[in-house]
Image (cartoon, helix red, strand yellow):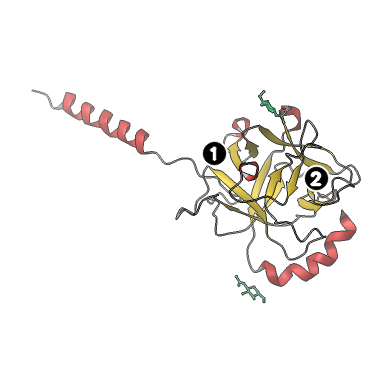
Amino acid sequence: MSSFPLVSFLITLMLAAAVCTQRPEHVLDTEKNPVLTTAQYLILPYSPRNGGGLLPVPVKLLPLCPLGISQSSVTALPGLPVSFSTPYVLMETHVHVMDYVNIEFRSEAWPGCEEFSKYWEIDESSSASKEPAVLIGGEKRVQNSWFRIKREENFVGGNAYKLTTLAGTIGTVKGPWKNAPQLVLTNDTAKTFLVKFRKVHGNLTATAPTSRLRMFPFY
Ligand SMILES: *[C@@H]1O[C@H](CO)[C@@H](O)[C@H](O)[C@H]1NC(C)=O
Ligand SMILES: *[C@@H]1O[C@H](CO)[C@@H](O)[C@H](O)[C@H]1NC(C)=O
């Protein structure tokens, strides 16, 4: 009897096992390394033509706080770093596509509203617009502070991602600060904010005082 049927049977079995035990896809940074909960990242527009990095800005006058998030109008400005974490403590340090994560700004340089946390959240107040703003002042365990990172399929091979929630996708609209793009939740795919994650190397705490000085004239 030929051993071929047995071999092909075993190969099929191994392939099936490989598919079943496949780990969820890692989110990759611009150096193609897995994004970790233990590091800090700059969230940058996927295309360098589409504005700068992310900054905390006031997005409404009354009340001024909590702040919203806007891209810098200066393309060369990388914005402030963030870190990712899971709402509930896990040993896992890799961030996977479709995990729920909290996003938190990590910077000593801060323009105000210090009484609020630096976690991102979706505006769920009664005054929120149809495309609610992404605000800063979230709470780790509250669902409006949970985001998912999806790879944009149109950019297979590139590491283009978008941030989503259960209720929509993070996009940009013209914001109140010099029309700089402001982050909102939307279902309009034309507004989707395509991003990449650039790992921050070195000690940020030490560089914060200079970035504070440089940050404000460029809003
Ligand atoms: C997007 O569409 C879903 C399903 O219709 C809806 O529940 C959600 O509120 C919408 N979100 C926004 C920001 O328009
Ligand atoms: C970064 O630098 C600050 C101030 O010099 C220091 O307190 C902190 O421990 C450093 N952090 C790391 C991760 O090296």
> Where residue 157 appears, x then y in whole percent?
57, 37
Vertical position of residue 73 compared to residue 21: above or below: below
Q: Secondary structure at mark 2?
A: loop
Q: Earlier in the sequence, mark 1 or mark 2?
A: 2
Tell me the quarter of the picture where residue 185 sits.
top right
Could you say which disc has been placed on residue 51 in the image? Answer: 2
User: Which residue is most to the left?
Assistant: 1
Near mark 1 (Cα within 10 A), the count class, few <14, some 14-19 or many ≥20, is some
Q: Mark 1 CB in 8 Å range of ligand 1?
A: no
Residue located 62% across and 58% down the image: 40
Residue at the image position 8 percent from the left and 23 percent from the top: 1
- From the viewer's perspective, is 109 left or right of 138? right
92 vs 210, nearest the viewer:
92
Question: 137 and 151: which one is in front?
Answer: 137
Q: Nearer the viewer, residue 4 or 34?
A: 34
Q: Amino acid at mark 2?
A: Gly
Query: Where does the image place residue 83, in percent across and percent down from the top left?
Result: 62, 55
Name the residue carrying label 1.
98
Kind of residue at disc 1: Met
Residue 79 picture location, percent across and down: 76, 55
User: Above or below — where is 204 with respect to 4?
Assistant: below
Q: Quadrant of residue 214?
A: bottom right
Q: Is mark 2 within 8 Å of ligand 1?
A: no
| In this view, 29 is above or below 10 | below
Which of the 4 quarters of the picture holds residue 7?
Answer: top left
Instruction: Residue at 53%, 42% (x, y): give it.
Output: 99
SS assignment at label 1: loop
